Structure formats: structure tokens, C-alpha cells
Amino acid sequence: MLKPTHSPRTLKDWLKLLDSQLLPASSESVLKLRHALADSNRSMRELADLMQQCPALALSVLREANSKSNGHSEQTESLEAAISRVGITRTENLLARLPTLPQQELPKALRQIQLISLHASQQANGLFAGRLARLWQEVHWGSLLFLAPLWTLLANRPELFEAWEQRVLVKGEPSSKVELDLLGVPLLKLCLALSEHWHLPEWITLGYRLLVNDRRLLVKALHIAHNNEHPIEQQQCLDADTNLRRWLTQPANSILLANCLAISAHQAWNSPHNLRWQRLTGLFLQLPLDKVQQLVHQNAVSSARQLPGTDLWHPAEALLWPWQARHLQAIVEQPKPAVISAWRQHCAQLLAQPSAFANVLQLTACANQALLACGMQRVLILLADRNHTRLMTQQQAGLDKAANSLSLEPQQSQLLRRLLSAPAQLRLSPANIAQFSATLPGTLKSLFTGEHLLIRSIASNNRVVMLIFADQGGGPLSDVSVQGFGKTVQCIERALASFASRGR
């Protein structure tokens, strides 16, 4: 499929691009559906069930059925009703329009997100369909199609899925920042716009409206759900908030909960996000957390059993693993030759004899560039005054402008005093962040958000003169970059020694 060379950066441009995006379908499922549609003995229910294995056609038929150009004022909520409205002939035409590829040649990101949708549908059917028996069609098709806006996005830009996984789930970057970097717009706003434009089932649109426009209501519900061990206190909180209690009983919440459970399980069953949605599901169903977890795990296994063995990830696999194991691992990107060449040039300049620098500003500017070339994304170089009473910014990269005029008093921080007493290196991680975070000045913590940070103090003539703070956007540090950081610091130390002895 041909794709534009440049990604849109506005909601309007994304909407225009994705509205015209045809989802590809597997040639195997298209062949089965072609035969089924030609069989006059097939019922609408049977055709709708078959279309679950061809999400591209399911979405296409539903969009066509609810298109205002067809003159229908009422919106259909189920695929069975959509097929009846569109008719067999038109459905066959929609099927013929779909690009087809062998199953394994479809973009992996598209197949993965559609697997998550199938898992969400199984969760919805297992958790809610029995309780909402009269609304099972809305529960089933709403949960299956909830992520349909992402299907079209990943059909057009499959590389976004891995980028999002690595930056948000592996490195821990804020999802809002990553979405703006990758798309230019918040992802949920894009999903809401597509849902409204396509006239997807109302429960889907309600779910996105809640996530985009009424998050305070959701946060209040999550806060009450956290107190899962005290159901009486939970009920008292709900009784005190009529609006929240009324919202919590809405059946439409079932498809949002099912999809959030499936999405968060994609990362890990014991992640904070998954636990949060399990608790809210317990509040919705008025069940204890352990019962909810038992049902959710059973539904995941049932979902996996219905799917053929593929190269895709299903969270049910993790139920057999050690609880702390993770299937997502950081992808180590090898430095590009041009970056390695730049790093070597900067280090050569630092190691030059005699010193190649006329002043400290030139030296630290070169050091800053070398640290960036070795893989660091945010760098702060602080110089200490003669009496170690003040630290001031000399160079910074990737940080807020406030870092340019930063001035710290080391005596107010135990950690800074220790670093200034002798050359040392400290690597902060989730394992020790609680131990050292309280001893770091608040200004530094606000600049370096995240749980991963390298700190190094460097001496000249047996006296610490410089502190370096560096990280990779707050996410986990790659081993290659940590090694590069160590070698770069050695070059900076030798550059300081050479600079101090110039003219002697």
C-alpha cells in the first residue's frame, strides 16, 4: 500500500487521511466470506459471526450502514443489523474493495491490535454479557470495534505501534508526550473524532468522550475502586455522589472496561494500569478483586484457545510465566556510523595535547556534544565555585529553558555534598530511586523526570569542579550508552587536566 511520505500533524489532516484508509484483509478470510455471501442459506447471524475473522469488512459494513448518505436517521449498533441494512450485494462490493494479502504478510502491528480487540471482546462477553443479556449485541460488537480507529492508524503507520511500546511501556515516557511527538495530536482525541465521523456504535463514542472530556469522573471512580477491600465504604462514597453512582451503572462502561483490561494486560498482568482497571471492573460488577482477577484470567485463556498459533503476543502466555517477567524488552539501537564518527571527533578534541580550548566554556560545550553523541538525550553540566558554595549551569541540552539559569547551594543537599567531596558516579534506577530522590534538590528532580539518571562528579587537581547529570529521556538506560557515557567522562577528565596545565 502506498503511503504519504509525511505524516499529518493536525487532527483535521489525520481525519482526512484515515477516513480514506482501506483496511487490508487476509486473503484466506476474504475467500471464506466470498463463498458465505454467495450462499443463500446463510443467515445474517452466521454472516456476522464469520466477519469477526475479517475485522476490515466488519468495520466497512458498519460504517456504510451508518453513513448519513444512505438516508438512515437511526444508528445501528450491531453488525447483524448493519448487514441487513446494507444488503448482501453491497456487502459483496465492500468486500471486493478491500486490499488482500496472505495473513502473515499483513502489517504485524495491525494484526496485533486486532488480536487485542478480539481479547477485549472475549473479556466483555465473559464479564458482562450474562449480566446484560438483553444488550449482548451492543456489548459484543462495541467491545470488538472499540479500537477500530487504531486499526486504520496502524494500517497506515504500522511503525507507530513499536515506537509507542518502546517509549511508553518499556522506557516509561509519558504517553501524552509520546503521542504529540509521533502524531502531533492526542491519540484519544483522534479516536474520538474518527468514532464520531464514522458513526460507530454509540457506546464506543461514549467511551472516548469519557476519556477525553470527563476524565475527572473516571478519576473519582478509580479512587473509590482502589478501596476494593472495603465494599461498604465504597458504597457509602457512591451514595454520597449521585452523578458518579448513576454513571457507574451505565452498561456502556462495559466495553471501555473490557478494552482497558485487554490493553493493559498487553504490558503485564501485574502492572499498575491493569490492577487499576481490574479494581474498577470489580466496582462496576460489585465483585471482590480476587474474583475479578480469576474471571479475567479465565477469559484470557479462552480467548487464546480460540486463536491459531501465530507470531503475535497474547497475554494468556504470561499466566504461565514468573509474575515479574515481561515480554516487552528494550530494543538496543546500535549507534549510526555518523553519530559514532561525531562522538569520536568530540573525544579527539577533548584529548588533544596541548589543550584545544581557550576557555572553560569551549571545553564544556565540546563535552556536552560528546555526551549527546554517546546516546544521552538530556544533559546538564554544573560548575562548582572555588569554595563549593554554589553550583551553576555551564551547559545543558534537552531540558527546559529554566536549566539555563540554574543555581544550587550544595549545602542544602546531602547528595550534592557527597558528590563534591570526591569524584564519584551514581546511577539512579527504580531499585534505588527512593533512597536518593529525597536527597536531590527539587529543581533537579523537576528537570529530570523519570526513574533513570546518571550523575558524575569530576575533579581537577584533586578538587571536584564539575557535576554532570545525563539520561535518556527518563527511560531505562541502554548498556551501550552507559558505556559510552563512562568513556566520554574519562575524556572530559583528561581534557580538564590538560586545560589546567596549559601554559606551564
Image (cartoon, rainbow, N blue to C red):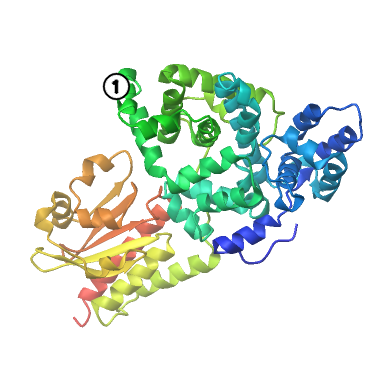
Q: Secondary structure at mark 1?
A: helix
Task: Please give left or right for residue 122 compared with residue 383 in the image.
Answer: right
In the picture, the quarter occupied by the N terminus is: bottom right
Q: Residue at image x 62%, y 41%?
A: 113
Residue 87 percent coordinates (x, y): 83, 40
Q: Nearer the viewer, residue 223 or 62?
A: 62
In the picture, the quarter occupied by the C terminus is: bottom left
Which quadrant holds residue 141? Answer: top right
Which quadrant holds residue 225? Answer: top left
Amino acid type, residue under disc 1 in the picture: Glu
Q: Residue at image x 38%, y 34%?
A: 243
Tell me if I can see residue 113 in this picture: yes
Residue 415 percent coordinates (x, y): 17, 50
Q: Residues within 10 Å of mark 1 (few under 14, many from 20)?
A: few
Tell me if I can see residue 275 in this picture: no
Q: Is 205 above or below relative to 260?
A: below
Q: Which residue is mark 1?
A: 233
Q: Residue at image x 42%, y 44%?
A: 214
Task: Please give left or right for residue 320 compared with residue 60 in the image.
Answer: left
Residue 202 percent coordinates (x, y): 59, 40
How many numbered badges does the structure rendering display?
A: 1
Q: Is 10 above or below relative to 54?
A: below
Q: Nearer the viewer, residue 318 or 60?
A: 60
Q: Is 227 above or below relative to 359?
A: above
Residue 145 percent coordinates (x, y): 64, 39
Q: Nearer the viewer, residue 29 or 390?
A: 29
Q: Nearer the viewer, residue 33 or 352?
A: 33
